[in-house]
Amino acid sequence: MSVARVTEIISSSKKSFDDAVENGVKRACKTLKNVQSAWVQDQKVMVQDGKIKEYRVCLKVTFVLED
């Protein structure tokens, strides 16, 4: 039997939502062991002078706890 935990992280990118997700998952895998999945809970953009300055995503990252 395995037990999993979910943690929430926020990641950003100046390029796109996809890039923000990639950055978040990559960073989570540096700290957390056994990352199994990530769910995009929310997306938003930061706007400055009428243009998109930054893409942000809120991720729920699931990882399996070790015995």
Image (tube, rainbow, N blue to C red):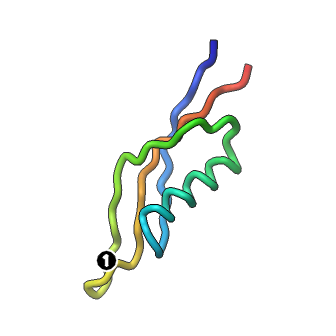
User: Considering only vertical position in the picture, is 10 above or below 36?
Assistant: below
Residue that lies at the very extreme toward the left in this rendered image: 50
Q: In the shown orientation, is residue 46 left or right of residue 25?
A: left
Q: Nearer the viewer, residue 16 or 28?
A: 16
Q: Position of residue 50 (x, y in %)?
A: 25, 84
Q: Residue at x 47, y 75 (%)?
A: 14
Q: In the shown orientation, is residue 27 left or right of residue 21?
A: right
Badge 1 marks a residue whose secondary structure is strand
Q: Position of residue 28 (x, y in %)?
A: 62, 49
Q: Quadrant of the N terminus?
A: top right
Dot 1 crowding, Cα within 10 Å, few <14, some 14–19, many 20+: few
Q: Quadrant of the C terminus?
A: top right
Q: Position of residue 51 (x, y in %)?
A: 31, 83
User: Considering only vertical position in the picture, is 4 above or below 8?
Assistant: above
Q: Residue at x 40, y 68 (%)?
A: 55
Q: Position of residue 8 (x, y in %)?
A: 48, 44
Residue that lies at the very extreme toward the bottom in this rendered image: 49
User: Considering only vertical position in the picture, is 56 above or below 63?
Assistant: below
Q: Which residue is mark 1?
A: 47
Q: What number of labels is visible? A: 1
Q: Residue at x 57, y 25 (%)?
A: 4
Residue that lies at the very extreme toward the right in this rendered image: 67
Q: Amino acid at mark 1?
A: Val
Q: Residue at x 57, y 60 (%)?
A: 23
Residue that lies at the very extreme toward the front in this rendered image: 18
Q: In the shown orientation, is residue 9 left or right of residue 49?
A: right
